[in-house]
Image (cartoon, rainbow, N blue to C red):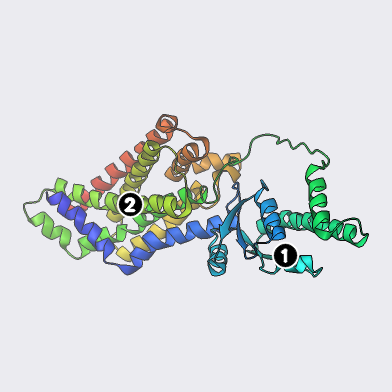
Amino acid sequence: MKSWAITTTNIKRLMRDPSTIFFVFVFPMLLILVLGASFGGGFTPKVGLLLEGQGEFARAFSDELTSDDDFTTVDYDDRDLLLEDVERGVVQMAVVIPADYDTKIMSGQVAEIEFVGRADQSVVQYRSTIEAVVAGESAIVRAARLLETEGLNSFEEGTTLARAMATGSTGPEVEVQTMGESLFGEDLGQFDLGAPQQLILFVFLTSLAGSAALIQTRRLGVSRRMVSTPTSIGEILVGETGGRFAVAMIQGLFIMIGAAVAFEVRWGNLGGASALLILVALVGAGGGMLMGSLFDNDEQAGSMGVFMGLGLAALGGCMVPLEIFPDTMQTIAHITPHAWALDGFAELIRRGGTIADIALELAVLAGFAAVLLALGTWRLRAKLTH
């Protein structure tokens, strides 16, 4: 099992480098969080609700907010946790109903509702909806106060009457019609668009930049010593290829599982997502093998790997969604494996496709993998036997 020993050695070299650990595991998850919190759309926003007061008016405001279909409310009982979740993007905004809310309303004072949100356009949009709820509750209080002032009812009776009238009243009917199809789908989660992009970007980036390790193996004489032992060239090639593939798979699985657990990313059909990940890792391994056999300087290979990894990712739709590209650029983007992988994930995540629905994408990625692995092993064999 000499090939397996070479593969495990490559994995151990990855795990021993703290900077590599950060860029392979931590940085992709941070980018998914930042991009999803900043630009994620097509999802139902979450409003954190902290009900410090338990009076009639506080509960009525809470019920009115909860019944709104524009967002989902999440109940909190800890203020610090609520503010922390707003900062992290777990909830997009927060509403705090203070403990003295009912007391101030009953005594005719100004009762304040605290609103907390991130400084982006989506929060401004949904803040107007919350303000509409506030305006509705204020109208009920003003009507009840007027009835009390005129001596027609007590404030409590007036509140009940005004709320009943507000509930039973009907306003103008507005019919909303969507023309055409939504670009990314109606039920796309906040992080569902960015997670596949970062998965593909970083698997290829790590594989190409990791070609430097293959060159270091030759420069330090490790490859020469392996060749001098009773180890065949084929075993060495299989071990080095397995090392590149294993590193790509470990990173890909971490991003996929981490995004599902931490950000509730839905990867769709398990078989299809697994097949895509395996082929993306094979293409990345093939690219890393080819670059590692073309260059003799590890620093040059590492720099070129980063440059090519970022350039191909940008062209392939990992930084800007392919759907936004002009038609010509979409066609050009498909000279990269990134675009085909993104098409496959889009079919699984947005349209509920199965492995059969992404057969073309899988076939193209298998072709990329076969060509790159063949070229990479051929060139590396030549280097080792030279």
Amino acid at pointer 1:
Asp
Q: Are marks 1 and 2 in contact (CB under 8 Å)?
A: no
Crowd rating for badge 1 (residues with CA inside 10 Å; few <14, some 14–19, many 20+): many
Residue in the foreground of this view, choosing between 57 and 296: 57
Q: Is residue 177 above or below residue 76?
A: above
Q: Secondary structure at mark 1?
A: helix
Going 40% across and 40% down the picture, which residue do you hit? Answer: 273
Query: Position of 64 compared to 256: left or right?
Result: right
Going 11% across and 54% down the picture, which residue do you hit? Answer: 227
Q: Which mark is residue 102?
A: 1
Residue in the foreground of this view, choosing between 34 and 6: 34
Q: Which mark is residue 312?
A: none
Q: Secondary structure at mark 2?
A: helix
Query: Position of 159 compared to 295: left or right?
Result: right
Q: Which residue is mark 2?
A: 248
| Position in image of residue 129 (x %, y %) | 72, 53
| Position in image of residue 118 (x %, y %) | 63, 63
